Image (spheres, helix red, strand yellow):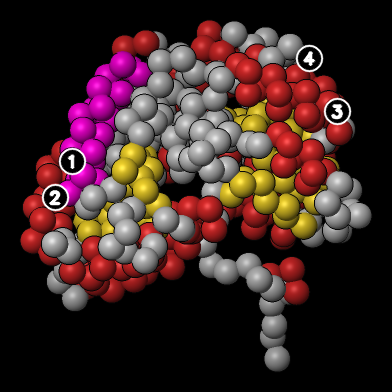
Amino acid sequence: MITAAKRLDGIGEYYFSQKLREIDALNKAGKNVINLGIGSPDLPPHPEVIKVLQEESIKPNVHAYQGYKGVPALRNAFAQWYKTWYNVDLDPDSELLPLIGSKEGIMHICMTYLNEGDRVLVPNPGYPTYRSAAKLAGGICTEYELTEEKNWFPDFDQLEELVYKEPSPLRLMFINYPHMPTGKLPTKELFEKIVAFGKKHNVLICHDNPYSFILNDTPMSLLSIEGSKDTVIELNSLSKAQNMAGWRVGLLCGSKERIDEILRFKSNMDSGMFLPVQLAAAKALTLGKEWYRDLNSVYTRRREIVFRLLELLGCRFDKSQAGMFVWASINADYKNGYDLSDEILNKAGVFITPGGIFGSAGEQYIRISLCSNEQRLEESIARIKDVIRK
Ligand SMILES: Cc1ncc(COP(=O)(O)O)c(C=O)c1O
C-alpha cells in the first residue's frame, strides 16, 4: 500500500484549494458564484512590465537555467526599492534573496531553522501557511492571540509567558503588519518592541510584509528599526501591490548570515527564475507614486461598496484597515463566520471567507476581498439583499 509520509498527518489540503473545487462544482451547476474570498489581484501589472517580459522572452539566449541568487538587475532593483520606500539599506550582493513568491520563503525559513520539536510563535488569527510550514518542518506551533480589544497587536506580557511555556526551545516567530486578515497597520513602537523581544530571547523574527502598499500611504519595514538585522528577516512580494500574483516573485531580506543559511536550503530545492520574469520584476520595482496612487484609488472605491455590503449583513468593522481585504465582526444572528459564509454561498451564490480559517480567534469574523470589480461587488449586494435574514 502506498501511504503519505507521517509529516503530512494533520496537514489538510489548503482551505482555498478545497473551496475553489466546491465553487467550481456550483458554477458547473449554473450558479455563477461571485468569489469574494481570495486575495489574487484581478488587475494586470503595469504595461511597461509586460512589455519587458515580451521583449525579453523573444530573445534566443534567455531560456537557460539562472543562478540561485537572482540577476544583478533584479537584486539592485530590490535594494533600491527598499531604500526608496522603506528607507532601509540592503547590500544588493549579500542581504537579499529573490524568491518564487514569498509563500515558498515561509517554508524555506522553517526548513532552515527548525529542528524536530522546536517551537514557533504564530499569530491567531494569521496566515495559515505559517502554521502548516512550521509543522511540515517538524516544528511545534505556539499561538499568540490577537484580539480586537488589544488593537490586533500582540500582548507582550502573554508573549513573555509563551517563551517558557514548553520545555522545547522557541526558535522562530512570525509576525505580519499590515496584518492579514485584520488589516491592522503597524506602528514604530510596535516594531521596536518586537525587535527588542527577538533580541532578548534570541528568537528569529520573520516579518511577512506583502501588504504595505495597499490602502496605506506609509509603507514600513521591520528592518527600518535600528539594529534589527541581528534578529529579523523580512519577506516581501510583488503579488499584491504590483498585480503580479501569478508571476511568483517575492523577496527575502536580512543579514548576510541569514541569507546564506536560507540559500543553503533553497538552492537544493529549485533554480533561479526565468530571466525575462526577473527583468520585468525589476521594472515593476521602479514604478513610482502614480502607480500606487492609481491602484489605491481603485481599491478605495471598491472598499466603499464592501462597507455597504457589510452594513447590509449587520457586521461591525474598522474603516481604517489596510491591505486588500475588509475584516468584519459578524452579528449575533449567525453562530459564527462559517455559518454566515455557508448561508450566503448557498442562498446568494456569493463566497465570503469565514474568519475561522485564520485561527480560533477569527471565528466570529469574516473577510471580504477587494479583488473584484465594482460591478461584481454591486451585484453581490443585490443578491445578498434578496436572501438576508431579516
Ligand atoms: C500574509 C500573506 N503572506 C504571504 C502571502 C503569499 O504571497 P506570495 O504570492 O508572495 O507567495 C500571502 C498571500 O495571500 C499572504 O496573505
Q: Residues within 10 Å of mark 4 (few under 14, many from 20)?
A: few
- Tell me if residue 102 comes above or below residue 287 in the rendering: below
x 28%, y 48%: residue: 315
Give the label on residue 381, or none: 2
* Left or right: 220 as drawn, with respect to 296: right
Ligand 1 closer than 8 Å to the CB at disc 2? Answer: no
Position of 163 with respect to 178 (left or right) is right
Mark 4 or mark 2, earlier in chain: 4
**Nearest to the observer: residue 333 or residue 320:** 333
Q: Secondary structure at mark 3?
A: helix
Question: Does the CB distance between marks 4 and 3 fall below 8 Å?
Answer: no
Q: Please report contact status of discs 2 and 3: CB closer than 8 Å, yes or no.
A: no
Q: Tell me whether the residue at label 2 lies in contact with that at label 1, contact meaning CB atoms closer than 8 angstroms.
A: yes
Q: Which mark is residue 308?
A: 1
Q: Position of residue 175 (x, y in %)?
A: 63, 36
Above or below: residue 338 compared with residue 219: below
Could you say which quadrant of the image residue 53 lies in? Answer: top left
- The type of residue carrying mark 4 is Gly
Marked residue nearer the N-terminal end (2 or 3): 3
Q: Looking at the picture, which amino acid does disc 3 mark?
A: Lys
Question: Which residue was labeled with disc 4?
Answer: 227
> x%, y% of residue 207?
64, 32
Give, as a single range, the part of the protein colored magenta.
291-312
**Residue 22 on image: x %, y %:** 34, 71
Residue bearing mark 3: 200
The relative height of residue 218 versus residue 327 in the rendered view (above or below) is above
Which quadrant of the figure has residue 297?
top left
Judge depth for marks 1 and 4 and give the one in front. 1
Mark 4–mark 2 distance (CA, rounded to whole Å): 48 Å
**Mark 2 and mark 3: span between their CA atoms?**
49 Å
Select label 4 or label 3 by which is in front.
Answer: 3
Real-space CA distance between mark 2 and mark 1, rounded to the nearest whole angstrom: 8 Å
